[in-house]
Amino acid sequence: MNKIYTIFFTILILTSCEDFSTIVEIDLPTSEKKMAVHLDLMSGTNDTSYFNITKVLAENISDNKGEIDFDKAVINLKNETDGTVLEVKAKEFFQGFDLFYIKNIDYKTGDVYSLNISYPDLESITASAIVLPSPPTINDIKLERVKGAGTFEDEDFTRMTIKLTDLPGENYYRIRIAIREEVIALTNDGDTVSIQTTMPYVYSNGYSDDPSVYGSYRGLLISDAAFDGKVKEFIINLERDYNTTYQFFGGIESSRISSGKGYMYFDQISKERYNFEKSYDTFQETDGNPFGTPTKVFNNIENGYGIFSISTGQKYELSY
Amino acid sequence: MNKLPLLCFCMIITTFISAQQQYTIKGYITEQETGEALISSNIFDVTSALGTVTNNFGFYSLTLPASEVALLYTYIGFATQSKKFILNKDTTINLELSNSLDLEEIEVVADKVVAKSRETQMSTISLGAKEIKAIPALLGEVDVLKSLQLLPGVQSGGEGQSGLYVRGGSPDQNLLLLDGVPVYNASHLFGFFSVFNADAIKDVKLIKGGFPARYGGRLSSVIEVNMKEGNKKEFKGAGSIGLISSKLTLEGPIGDKTSFMLSGRRTYIDLLARPLIKSSLKQDGIDGVLGYYFYDFNGKINHTFSDKNRLYLSFYSGRDAFYYNATEDTDDRKETNNTNLGWGNYTSVLRWNHLFQDNLFANLALSYSRYNINTGVSFSDLDKSNNQSNEFSFNYSSGIEDIALNYTFDYLPNPDHYIKYGVSAIHHRFNPGQFKLFSKENQTIGLDTVIGQKIVPTLEYAAFVEDEVKINKKLSLNAGLHFSAFSVQKKNYFSIQPRLSSRYMLQDDLSLKASFSTMRQYTQLLAFEGLGLPTDLWVPSTKRIKPQDAWQVSLGLAKDLGNDYEFSAETYYKGMSNLIAFKDGNGIFQIDDWQDRVTQGKGRSFGFELYAKKKTGKLTGWIGYTWSKTDRKFDDVNFDTWFPFKYDRRHDISVVGQYEISKKWSFSGSWVYGTGNTATITYQKVPQQPWDYIKNDLSSIDLGTFAYGGYSIVENRNNYRLRPFHRLDLGFARKVSRKTWDYTVSFGAYNAYNRKNPFFVDYDTVYADGGGDGKIVLKEYSLFPVIPYINFGFEF
């Protein structure tokens, strides 16, 4: 038996003298055969919807653009209810990107639109969306300036109160607010020049403590699960910096001052759009947390990724 | 009306039968060598073909018609005893069975008595301490829970982990009872060892389905761990010296009516490494210590006042501790750092057994259970040049504390009925996490506050009644009802849970079994999947978080081949609702309200299990196979679509064997194979792009023109499956007997053929020899190579 002892322990000691953690490398599948598209058509506000198409990239490459040749993409946006095809134009240069765009029309409630995109060597993608009815009309919008009670001490903000009667059934809404600001640039010698900016309306990071409201980067998202079919009042705080001064290089200071004017878009959005926005935000906020659970971003594109939706909106002018 | 005469006839017959003179035979069955009670020992009257079993305290009661009786007292692995006499009065027979198997001829008679196929209860497997100790283990540390992982229907979480996943359930869905008291955290060292010291354990019983009505409060399993009572015959000691810990157990009688058992275990790596660590720190100018250890301590004392009254007091205390205490003292500064992380369980129970009458046994238990974690970090800094000082301390604590009262009764009116009923009340006190912060600059206190979540007190009540009834010689049932109520934050939950198990004998040694049970759970664990971290948080059902529910049906066959082999095949389906999970993106280590981070949903698990066991002879052991599928579905996870449970495992095989080579030498081995665990892996991304946006051409309002980053594509939660898991563990033991003591040298290897089993996956960048951008790959990390062990055990 002593031999057994000796042989056994010799083998074990030899085989166990290695790194405690062993690594097995697995090549990730690479895939550049799929496309991603993110398009929100807008009914009711005569806006233009811009969108982009990209390749889906493998996680293990450094390229983060996935650009396609716009001329080779074939996009078919069709009303499946009456057979009409919408014109999709390509290549409008905006903020350094080429984009596709569509001049929105007043889409008919209940009509179904299909999106079909094909591109050489990539899998064709399809998606469909239904035109939602208009959101409930907001008859009562109150705006008031609240002094010295903002997020930061002594900061002023605008409190907006809106009241609506919810549509019966499962509904999702989105509120987006644009506030007109004036920008004043000052030189060091005291001369004052007023400048009309190219984008005088800026998006407002409104927020609400209401549990039915989710503060997305792209607006306030609302689920009516808690007030289905009932009268509901929301209080929204519009937080823009007022009289904020910026110091720029070259001895020029710039101040942004609220003009007291703006617009509110109140949209009825699909559940799919709601899920997409929420999950996208969650992904961005939690990406990289080793103790967090992974986030799946919602997808309704067949054979590809992204979101296709049709929102129906109403536009309200704000003045305070 | 035609049925009325028949009904009357039946009533008369029943009255006539009841009127026959009956007497009760009662008593306790104990082990001859130690006096320990034998649980589930069989008592069978050959004359009438009626019988019963002992309860958890070794008590039995058998009421038979007055006549000649031929009783067989049997217990697996023990010599059967028989008693033949005329039953003409109530009789007490306390019997001791010997575990030396010399009476072979009587065992043959006993084949049909102890047969697994004859039990009404299904989905149940018991393991004795001897079986558990024979299984080779990681670093030679015998592990009670890891031995259960080798049974069909039970899966481990990952390499080396002691967590149990029973029929698709989570570890918090196991009702883990140590002498009847719930244990909330069953692991030491982040799950690599369980808290149960095998030297202090008598036996373990696992119930996976068909739960009798006496159990409640968890969805997936009941694990009953019974501590030794202490040798009633003579003073005995046992211990072992292993690679990471040493153990010592002492037991013996105190007078004629009292016995005790004390058992302790502690790791000593910190003590052995302390000089090295101190020296290493000293080189950096630090006077300090750094270490980790765990210990556990079991104790039990019991006293027999009379045949009618017995008192038991048992307790367990176990704790893990990490510490780093350092002082850096220089000419101009003095800095101190004290960091301590500790967590552990404490349980105790005072139990009174009382025999109200020969066939009515009562058990009253007052118990206490506590699990807590405490983390403390404190810094102080003194500037000697100007005598300026700063202090800062941070403490985190969380846990759960229970005080419970149980009163249960065993009533055996006749051999056809074994009725159990009882009530219980538990006062839970949840601490879902509190932070204490303190800072001081010179003599001025800057911060002294407690933040976090409030203590949540709750009350849980239960009542049950069950009857194991023999309908006829072929059919028996265990039918019962379990009622539970839970009161939290002025919200009350109620539940009535029906339970039914049945057995139908197809042949003398082959039975068909079926069961149905519903379960409800009011407490749950918020945990980081995969590791038994001390930060795992027990939380109650609340106004917002509903209790978890489950129902399960099982169907199976049980077959015995003599007294040597038993076989079972079972299939099951389990549905679960109001399960709790972190919402996408959320996890542990967040300070916001835990209720905001979780979502509730459904689960389902189905599969079949095969089990073959050889119980006697030189070679003993079992083979288990499980095929199963387990899914989950939550509102806020994976967009309300089904996805595989992290531990969904299609195939799971275990082979366990022990072979007695000679009287001195024995060999043991176990081999396990399991389909790989799942993980959520992304391998594609939607690149960064100007998002879709809407532009109002007239007023130049741009909405949503943010330059969003891209996002990784998660096709599905748990979309990736790691490589299969398999491992062979081998062990040898040599037992040597001396005049006054015996010793055993055990040695072996964990993961004997050095399988690189995946523990977790992560991304990494690998570079070619010539450099370049590098390539991102997925890496599967494994933890344990082949690890030899040696252990020296002794008994006196």
Image: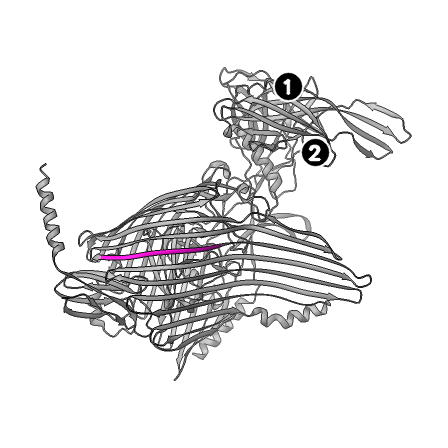
Question: Which disc number belongs to residue A316?
Answer: 1
Decide if residue B126 is on the left or right side of residue A319.
left
Q: Considering the numbered disc 1 on the image, is that residue within a helix, a strand or a loop?
A: strand
Q: Earlier in the sequence, mark 1 or mark 2?
A: 2
Q: Which quadrant of the view contains residue A149?
A: top right
Q: Considering the numbered disc 2 on the image, is that residue within a helix, a strand or a loop?
A: loop
Label 2 Cα neighbours within 10 Å, binned few <14 / some 14-19 / many ≥20: some
Same subunit: marks 1 and 2: yes
Q: Nearer the viewer, residue B25 or B504?
A: B25
Q: Nearer the viewer, residue A62 or B650?
A: B650
In percent of width and height, residue B280 lies at 68, 69
Location of the C terminus of chain B by quadrant is: bottom left
Location of the N terminus of chain B by quadrant is: top left
In percent of width and height, residue B738 lies at 40, 83
B50 within the magenta span: no
Cα separation, mark 1 vs mark 2, equals: 24 Å
Q: Is residue B504 above or below residue A195?
A: below
Mostly what secondary structure, the magenta segment? Answer: strand
- The residue that label 2 is drawn on is A150
